Amino acid sequence: FVIQAEGGIMSITGPAEGPPSKVGVAIVDITAALYAVIAIQAALRQREGSGQGQRIDISLLESQVAWLANVASNYLVSAQPPGRYGNAHPNIVPYETFATADGHVALGIGNDRQFAAFCRAAGCSALAQEPRFASNPQRVAHRAELIPLLQEVFRQRGNREWLQLFLETGVPGGPINSVDQVFAHPQVQAL
């Protein structure tokens, strides 16, 4: 928990207007353990070739800092400290959760083609034609204008309809499952 705070992840996690939040699981511990396994495998491989052992050094802090990924890259390029976007993405719009008529869904549109396909299928093609929203850089710049418009579109249908639309159009989106729903999911059970 403290490493999440010191390592920056809490500063970018949580609602934009809310307090910093931790990730719901001990992600720093898990990440450090994965890095340790990778390092052990590399050391064993090195020993096979050279007969020499290796010293492995893994820290929670460096694992957390590495986990900042694209947020760290954005900062290192711009020198602008990132804010919190809640469930939204700092560089891709729309890429967040939306309230529907009977729940919530996650929408992960990654490019302009997907945005146009989504808008056609959702009955809001005019949004994809609007210059402010036609490209991802424009959607990022006009996020505060676009998201409320999309929220109104999402409220017109229930989760089941939206999930079917995502499947039919190839738009990345899905349900927000509770833990019991995850373990009841046929694919999770099969795995």
Image: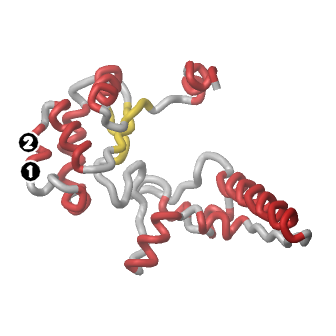
Which secondary structure, mark 1?
loop
Q: Which residue is mark 2?
A: 126
> Does 103 appear above or below 8?
above
- Name the residue: 46% across, 64% down: 70
Residue 71 is marked as none
Residue 154, picture quadrant? top left
Identify the residue at image location x=59%, y=19%: 184
Q: Nearer the viewer, residue 163 or 146?
A: 163
The correct choice, above or below, for 85 with respect to 180 in the image is below
Displayed quadrant of residue 92? bottom left
Residue type at tag 2:
Ala
- The residue that disc 1 covers is 130
Q: Nearer the viewer, residue 125 or 142?
A: 125
Please rate how many residues cluster around mark 1, counting C-alpha atoms within 10 Å: few if below 14, some from 14 to 19, many from 20: few
Say if residue 101 shows up in the picture: no
Q: Quadrant of the N terminus?
A: bottom right
Residue 25 on image: x %, y %: 65, 47
Element marked by disc 2: helix
Can you see residue 78?
A: yes
